[in-house]
Image: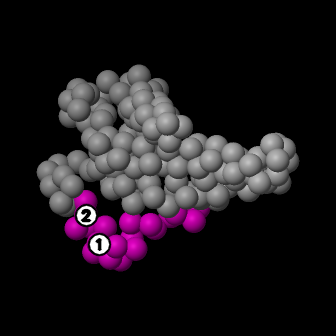
């Protein structure tokens, strides 16, 4: 039940924050000038592309965030429970708890990263083509492993936040 609750919680928060992630991705990609106020950017996207543009790629992102959140939080709880069972109810100390957090976050990241890569590309894409064009571009840049380009830096950031 923890895995399901964690996955659903992750999807809910990600849906609420997704327009901000879209803006961040576009600013990073250089398609929106830096320094503009957030409301101005959001209104500009909606005026030029429609409200749906704020959620372009959301389905793929949610497909990644559900297992990531479920694994990150559910696996952490499961590892803690296993530890308590193995050590007669004793709570894990700092090092085991940190290890559980890092392992759980890393596992979730590996599962979700390819879908996040696709979602980020869809966020910044303008024009037609959709998913097929995005996948074609990614595979042309390095085959299936290109879906994991940047996973090292993302994992390091995640581990440092854990």
Question: Residue 107 vs residue 144: left or right?
Answer: right
Question: Is label 1 in contact with label 2 (beta carbons under 8 Å)?
Answer: yes
Residue under numbered circle 2: 135
Q: What secondary structure is the magenta-colored segment mainly?
A: helix
Residue 105, x across and y down, in percent: 60, 52
Q: Nearer the viewer, residue 82 or 4?
A: 82
Residue under numbered circle 1: 139
State the mark number for residue 28: none
Residue at 42 percent across and 30 percent down: it is: 12
* Dot 1: element: helix
Question: Residue 37 vs residue 125: left or right?
Answer: right
| Magenta stretch, residue numbers | 134-153
* Dot 2: element: helix
What is the spatial separation of the Cα atoms under label 1 and label 2, in whole angstroms?
Answer: 6 Å
Q: Residues within 10 Å of mark 1 (few under 14, many from 20)?
A: few
Question: Residue 128 vs residue 117: left or right?
Answer: left
Residue 60 makes an appearance in the image: yes
Residue 136 sits inside the magenta stretch: yes
Q: Nearer the viewer, residue 20 or 27?
A: 20
Residue 67, placed above or below residue 53 = below
């Amino acid at each position: 039940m923890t895995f399901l609750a964690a996955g659903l919680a992750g999807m809910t928060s990600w849906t609420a924050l997704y327009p901000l992630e879209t803006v961040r991705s576009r600013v990073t990609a250089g398609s929106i000038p830096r320094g503009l106020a957030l409301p101005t950017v959001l209104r500009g996207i909606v005026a030029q592309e429609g409200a749906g543009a704020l959620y372009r790629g959301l389905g793929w992102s949610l497909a990644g965030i559900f297992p990531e959140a479920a694994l990150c939080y559910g696996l952490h709880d499961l590892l803690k429970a296993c530890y308590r069972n193995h050590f007669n109810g004793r709570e894990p100390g700092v090092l085991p708890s940190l290890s559980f957090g890092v392992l759980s976050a890393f596992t979730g990241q590996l599962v979700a990263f390819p879908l996040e890569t696709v979602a980020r590309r869809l966020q910044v894409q303008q024009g037609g083509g959709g998913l097929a064009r995005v996948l074609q571009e990614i595979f042309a840049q390095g085959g299936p492993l290109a879906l994991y380009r940047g996973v090292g830096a993302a994992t390091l950031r995640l581990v440092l936040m854990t």
